[in-house]
Image: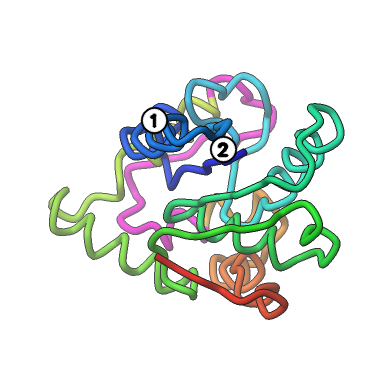
Amino acid sequence: MIALVHGLEGSSDSNYMRGIAEKAWAAGFHVVRLNQRNCGGTELLTPTLYNSGMSGDYRAVLEELAKGDGFEQIFFFAGYSMGRNLVTKMAGSRRELARQLREWCGVYLRWILAACADDLDRWTIIFNQGALCPWIVERYARKAELFPQRMRRMDLGRFETVREFDDAITAPSFGFKDAQAYYESAGARRSSGRFVCRFL
């Protein structure tokens, strides 16, 4: 069994997710392609946003596959970019997962989330002429329409960086004082020491 977790604003239908799934299936594996909260057309399923620290979602998937679907000691979790942080955080957070989670890997992401946000801002400046990644803003706007009682309506055009967006929206939505506090708490480096990390 291989479970795949996509990156920021991707989905279970992202090309890289479909590509590795096809290769794994051809090699004889069962494959599960997961959507993070709100991704892949699932915005209506939850009033909450998603963030880089919600590894509990993937522990729940692991436990459901093991207990509900009968897959025992066969799990291989692969996370891409933001998904790498989530998979790493999940793998390092509970020692008992080692009995079920035989292998895991992460594909590209800096170890420190604050540096990842800064990298994303640099790439955005190159490709989008300085505007905040538009898909992040668009998703929040959709969520605000679907759940106006939970999401604050604001001038989304005022954000120029991911850090500004996280400072004003992501961090307070999950009880963090600011973006830096969110990055420090959500980053996997605090929980990964129990495992040997092999990053691709």
Q: Which residues are magenta?
A: 145-167
- Secondary structure under the numbered disc 2 in the rendered image: loop
Q: Residue at x 79, y 27 (%)?
A: 69
Front disc: 1 or 2: 1
In the current view of this chain or complex, which residue is farthest to the front?
A: 28
Task: Pinpoint residue 1: horizontal percent, then vertical percent.
Answer: 62, 38
Left or right, 14 with respect to 193, comes to left
- The mark found on residue 5 in the picture is none
Near-viewer residue (163 or 31): 31
Q: Residue at x 36, y 52 (%)?
A: 159
Scheme by which the image is coloured: rainbow
Which amino acid lies under the numbered mark 1 shown in the image of this protein?
Glu
Near-viewer residue (75 or 85): 75
Q: CA distance from mark 1 to mark 2?
A: 20 Å
Near-viewer residue (85 or 135): 85
Task: Pinpoint residue 79: horizontal percent, then vertical percent.
Answer: 50, 51
Q: Which residue is mark 1?
A: 22
- The mark found on residue 36 in the picture is 2
Residue 174 is a magenta residue = no
Tell me: residue 191, above or below residue 2: below
Tell me: residue 121, above or below residue 67: below
Task: Pinpoint residue 52: horizontal percent, then vertical percent.
Answer: 57, 55
Left or right, 62 with respect to 109, comes to right
Location of the C terminus by quadrant is bottom left
- Secondary structure under the numbered disc 1 in the rendered image: helix
Q: Residue at x 61, y 76 (%)?
A: 196
Which amino acid lies under the numbered mark 2 shown in the image of this protein?
Gln
